[in-house]
Amino acid sequence: MDGMEIEKYAIGQSVARGEDPRLLTGGGRFTDDVIADNAAIGYLLRSPYAHADLRGLDLAAALAAPGVLAILTLSDLEAAGFGTLQNKIPLEGRGGAAMIKPARPSLAADRVRYQGEPIALVVAESLAEARDAAELIELDAEPRAAVTDPRAAGEAAAAQLHDSAPANLCVDWEHGDGDAVDAAFAAAAHISRLEIENNRIVINPMEPRAALAEYDAGEDRFTLHVGSQGVFGLRNSVAGDILNVDREKLRVRTYDVGGSFGMKSAPYPEYGPLLLAAKRIGRPVRWRDDRSDSFLADQHGRGSVVEASMAFDAEGKVLAARVIGHANVGAYVSQTGPMMTTRNILRNFPSLYRLPLLYIRTYCRFTNTGPIAAYRGAGRPESNYYVERLMDTAAREMGLDRIELRRRNMLTPGEIPFKAVSGMTYDSGDFPAVLSDALARADWDGFAARQAEAAGRGKLRGLGLACYLEATGAPSTEMGGIRFDEDGGVTITSGTQNYGQGHSAPFAQILSSTLSIPFPLIRLAQGDSDALLAGGGTGGSKSMITGGGAILEAAEQVVEKGRHLAASALEAAVEDIGFEDGAFRILGTDRAITVMALAARLREDGLGGAQEKDALDVALTHEPAPSTFPNGCHVAEVEIDPDTGVTRVVRYIVVDDFYQSTLMSTRGWIPLLADF
């Protein structure tokens, strides 16, 4: 690949997404597109009650209905030795108290605790027959009082969901020195206080959740085709927690994914019953959720109320902050549980300001609602919202300019690296420069004239801004694989999962820039647990940190292996072989062989020796760099018609800094790929 081509596809250049031509021309392959001969159809009977005792199920009429092949309840799962869905977050409460994690079976037992909780799986020849049969199941239930608000859930008269969780308390979590914060507040010249609600959000991706379950009796092995954010972790959880089998007994496949944003990362109750049904009837079982059922059964996002306050001295310098939260975890603890309203608030609330003291206390309570889990930033947007609202409120209350108040408290480049009150160390960033750039691009100083002009037309004109800093998701071990294929192409294997981000182009840019491999020849393989050594999946804005870092490390190994192979091909000593611009060269000479030519020689004749065709291939596990801290500033200008309330966004300016100094210092600059 010549220099112009290298530059065209270099890291940081704008390159078209590799997935789009196929997706835009109808070539996508989503879970419901997977073909399986003789597949039966599954349908879930879900609870119509938010809270009720289950006294019994009469399945007789449903079992006798046309087309019905099987009906599974909790007793079938227990007889098969299945386990329950698990929370994976080791979170402790005040004084080291354990987080309460009531068992969450895949199908309800003697009580239902939220509307939409699955009770039975009906398997039939067609969806219509499965639906009809589900309506014939006689459900003997005694409704109970329900509670849906996390604050009300702690009251003495509130309905109790679990005997193991008095006052519906999942965990009472705190961080920081409360006494020191109290003292700072007592000495403050001004305190700003806000009550902020982040309401529960239904996650509504373009592709509803779906699954295809298969069982191979000869191999005693399951296969689950399902939309996910990473097959490796999902395989481990479903196999180890639900099926109670060795990991090798389950294969998980993910293809194209029509949106996820956190919701398709963890196991769901449907997966275990579907896999057992496939084994029972000896046929594949297909299931796709209805949109209306998804609103009830998919995990939800947000769902918290906080009392946030910030103390300032007479000069407007922040002295301390306090966040008291009431978080709704739903009827059960999801796999990520209360992480969003506890640790992620701590990691992100300090933002890009010089905050000396922070106290956080979060009461996480069970309610008769669907479980809450990670969604669209999972605590990071909330944290930045809290602190920016407090900055605006304090400036207004203290009679200070809102930009000036931010500048007085904003960290400067000379203070970095900076250990924040969260315990995390910011390793890069020029926050004042980003703010200044955003204000200049938004013509902040010219707003008064535009506001006056709008008033002359009878319109209201408003201007707002928000700065932010996010601590990206904690990195996880990732696979880096590079394979030189028989057809002359090169395949990257990664444990990340594209569910809309467009991984193929930026990952290919890394490999192309590092090894000078022609960009069009590079493919990306994801979504097959059998092909992976590790994989943290995609989430928490870490794909480029983990997946990109793994590709870089794998490329380094390709170079090291290639030096030895090139020495054989060029009949030289290994120590005399260098690598530059995609070619292995005898130092000080013009004798060289490109990495692609070396791979071709291996396929053709093994370099005339005992080398295998795949001698240049690499598959490794990568331990990534620590969390990164993307930051930026958003400025929005709107115009409102006071007569109609119609609001028009006049301009929206964003300046982001996604620089990652850890990767730069070790392997070269890489732009972060955000996982939303």
Image (cartoon, rainbow, N blue to C red):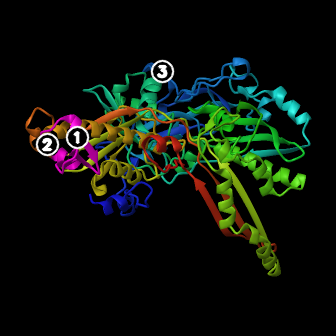
Q: Nearer the viewer, residue 565 or 588?
A: 588
- Crowd rating for badge 3 (residues with CA inside 10 Å; few <14, some 14–19, many 20+): few
Q: Is residue 403 visible?
A: yes
Q: Amino acid at mark 2?
A: Leu
- Crowd rating for badge 1 (residues with CA inside 10 Å; few <14, some 14–19, many 20+): many
Residues at circles 2 and 1 in contact by the CB criterion of under 8 Å: yes
Q: Tell me which numbered mark, 3 or 1, is placed earlier along the sequence.
A: 3
Residue at the spot of label 3: 78
The residues tagged by marks 3 and 2 sit, at their Cα atoms, a distance apart of 64 Å
* Location of residue 69 (image quadrant): top left
Residue at the spot of label 2: 570
Q: Which residue does the image show at 68% across and 24% down from the upper left?
A: 162
**573 is within the stretch colored magenta:** yes
Name, please, the residue furthest toward the bottom: 457
Q: Tell me which numbered mark, 2 or 1, is placed earlier along the sequence.
A: 2
Secondary element at tag 1: strand
Secondary element at tag 2: helix
* Location of residue 452 (image quadrant): bottom right
Query: In this picture, which residue range is highlighted in magenta?
Result: 571-600
Residues at circles 3 and 1 in contact by the CB criterion of under 8 Å: no
